[in-house]
Amino acid sequence: MATETRTGAPTLRFAATVDTIDDRRLLRVPEQISRQLPSRGQVAVQGTIDDQPFTTVVEPDGRGGHWIDLDATAQQEAGRTVGDSVDIEFAVRKDWPEPTVPEDLAAALAAAPAAIERVWSDITPMARWEWVRWVKSTKNPDTRQRRVEVTISKLDAGKRRPCCFDLSSCTDPDLARSGKLRQ
């Protein structure tokens, strides 16, 4: 169900069941809600889960839908377990929250020349999410290290976004198989 907010952005409401893949808790966004989002890729949202506020980036599932990393929404204190039903309400945000930059990328950025740090600071939070997502989308430590190095090199060349990866695929290597969120 959707209603309009005062800003014109639709507020989407739905119920979901807490699910897990391995030990990560997540919520799968129903297809009819996901279709109302502006992108098949990541989408910044703000809302409530059982009336508790959250802000996050809804992730693509690689099948044209989306999912919410429940553990990333600061909801762990609520004690929700697999099978619990929750009521969700959210609206798309124009401004993106800052991503959590992984330690290896943060260290490389801190060690980089000031010009690279200025490019990183100048790009949008959405672009920073894309860089973080690209670096984290592999389990192979050597590939990940190369991606950190390539990130620094591309930022040094003035590139503002990574290229050549499917923004609608699920890039979490712990939860995805062949770019699709595991069932």
Image (spheres, rainbow, N blue to C red):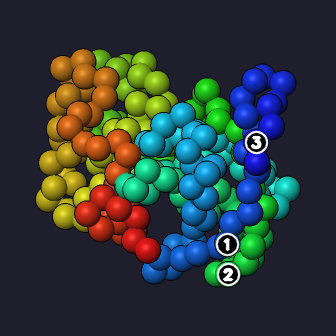
Task: Identify the image quadrant of residue 45.
Answer: top right
- Does residue 46 sit above or below 173 in this rendering? above
Q: Are marks 1 and 2 in contact (CB under 8 Å)?
A: yes
- Does residue 143 sit above or below 55 in this rendering? below
Task: Identify the image quadrant of residue 94.
Answer: top right
Q: Secondary structure at mark 3?
A: strand
Among the two numbered marks 1 and 2 on one chain, the one whose residue lies closer to the N terminus? 1
Query: Mark 2 is on which residue type?
Result: Gly
Instruction: Provide the residue designation for mark 1.
Output: 17
- Point out which mark residue 104 bears: none
Q: Are marks 1 and 3 in contact (CB under 8 Å)?
A: no
Among the two numbered marks 1 and 3 on one chain, the one whose residue lies closer to the N terminus? 3
Picture coordinates of residue 54, whole percent (x, y): 72, 50
Among the two numbered marks 3 and 2 on one chain, the one whose residue lies closer to the N terminus? 3
Query: Mark 1 is on which residue type?
Result: Thr
Q: Is residue 60 left or right of residue 112?
A: right
Q: Nearer the viewer, mark 3 or mark 2?
A: 3
Query: Mark 3 is on which residue type?
Result: Ala
Picture coordinates of residue 67, whole percent (x, y): 54, 58
Q: Nearer the viewer, mark 1 or mark 3?
A: 3
Q: Secondary structure at mark 2?
A: loop
- Point out which mark residue 83 bears: 2
Task: Identify the image quadrant of residue 6.
Answer: top right
Residue at 48 percent of width and 37 percent of height: 39
Instruction: Provide the residue designation for mark 3.
Output: 2
- Does residue 136 sit above or below 127 in this rendering? below
Q: Is residue 60 left or right of residue 149?
A: right
Picture coordinates of residue 52, whole percent (x, y): 81, 56
